[in-house]
């Protein structure tokens, strides 16, 4: 039975369930399905905001939620990047910022897993939250691409956002690793 205390974790699980559906919609490269993918993607991204907000606001944070939420974010972002590469919406030089984002997310996830076992608590910075937000918005622009006929060059907005996201990704990754190495020195 779903209780109020489970709502944040349910939202996180919702985000994970959306991923294969979004990918399925994107694969067909159909106008309607691209819009459906974008709508589901936006809902998945909003669930990222609301799961944490509700958990903190009502003091119902859980160990499971703290573990799964950042993983769900990374799976969402990396999956969307992979599918956009697979259908050539991300190609050429855009592979580089995409690769930077993927490598950083995998490395930070590995470091987080290490710290879960070794108990130091390294909190997510506000800048990292901004990074995740920028990545998610950028990927939304790339998902819809030129199917959004009301604004010309919307895909270009996504391309620029991808480069900016990768710069922020490098910087926040540097800060995360710098802060975490203090624990290795002990």
Image (cartoon, grey):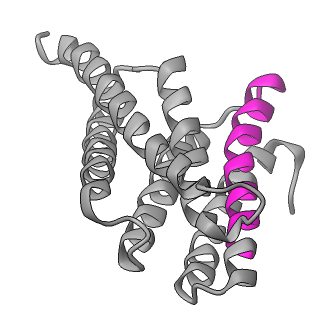
Going by the picture, which residue comes out furthest to the left? 185
Q: Quadrant of the C terminus?
A: top left
The residue drawn where x is 71% and y is 38% is 49
Of 100 and 96, nearer the camera is 96
**Which residues are drawn in magenta?**
36-59
Q: Nearer the viewer, residue 88 or 6?
A: 88
53 relative to 180, above or below: below
Q: Position of residue 172 (x, y in %)?
A: 36, 24
Left or right: 49 as drawn, with respect to 81: right
Q: Is residue 85 left or right of residue 60?
A: left
Q: Is residue 18 left or right of residue 110?
A: right
- Residue in the picture at 27% in, 58% down: 95
In-image side of 130 versus 100 (left or right): right
Q: Please report the residue visible at 64 percent of the width from the left and 66 percent of the height from the top.
A: 144
The residue under the point 75% across, 82% down is: 32
Q: Nearer the viewer, residue 25 or 19?
A: 25
Confirm whether the magenta stretch covers residue 55: yes
Residue 138 lies within the magenta run: no
Where 145 falls versus 126 (above or below)?
A: below
- Asked where in the image residue 139 lies, by quadrant, the reply is bottom right
Residue 133 spot, x, y in % from top left: 59, 37
Please tell me whether the stretch drawn in magenta is mainly helix, strand or loop. helix
Residue 57 sits above or below residue 150 on the image: above
Q: How many marks?
A: 0
Quadrant in which the N terminus is drawn: bottom right
Residue 17 percent across, percent down from the top left: 64, 70
Q: Residue furthest front?
A: 152
The image shows residue 31 at horizontal and vertical percentages of 70, 82
Up-down relation of residue 182 to residue 7 (above or below): above
């Amino acid at each position: 039975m779903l209780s109020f205390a489970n709502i944040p974790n349910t939202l996180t699980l919702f985000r994970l369930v959306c991923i294969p559906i979004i990918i399925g919609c994107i694969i067909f490269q159909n106008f309607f399905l691209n819009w459906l993918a974008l709508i589901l993607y936006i809902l998945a991204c909003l669930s990222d905001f609301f799961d944490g907000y509700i958990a903190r606001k009502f003091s119902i944070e859980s160990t499971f939620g703290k573990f799964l939420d950042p993983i769900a974010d990374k799976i969402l972002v990396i999956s969307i990047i992979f599918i956009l590469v697979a259908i050539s919406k991300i190609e050429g030089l855009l592979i580089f910022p995409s690769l930077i984002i993927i490598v950083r997310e995998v490395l930070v996830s590995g470091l987080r897993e290490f710290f879960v076992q070794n108990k130091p608590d390294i909190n997510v910075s506000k800048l990292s939250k901004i990074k995740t937000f920028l990545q998610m918005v950028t990927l939304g622009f790339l998902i819809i691409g030129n199917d959004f006929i009301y604004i010309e060059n919307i895909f270009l907005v996504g391309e620029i956002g991808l480069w900016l996201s990768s710069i922020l990704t490098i910087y926040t990754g540097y800060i995360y690793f710098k802060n975490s190495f203090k624990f290795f020195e002990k």
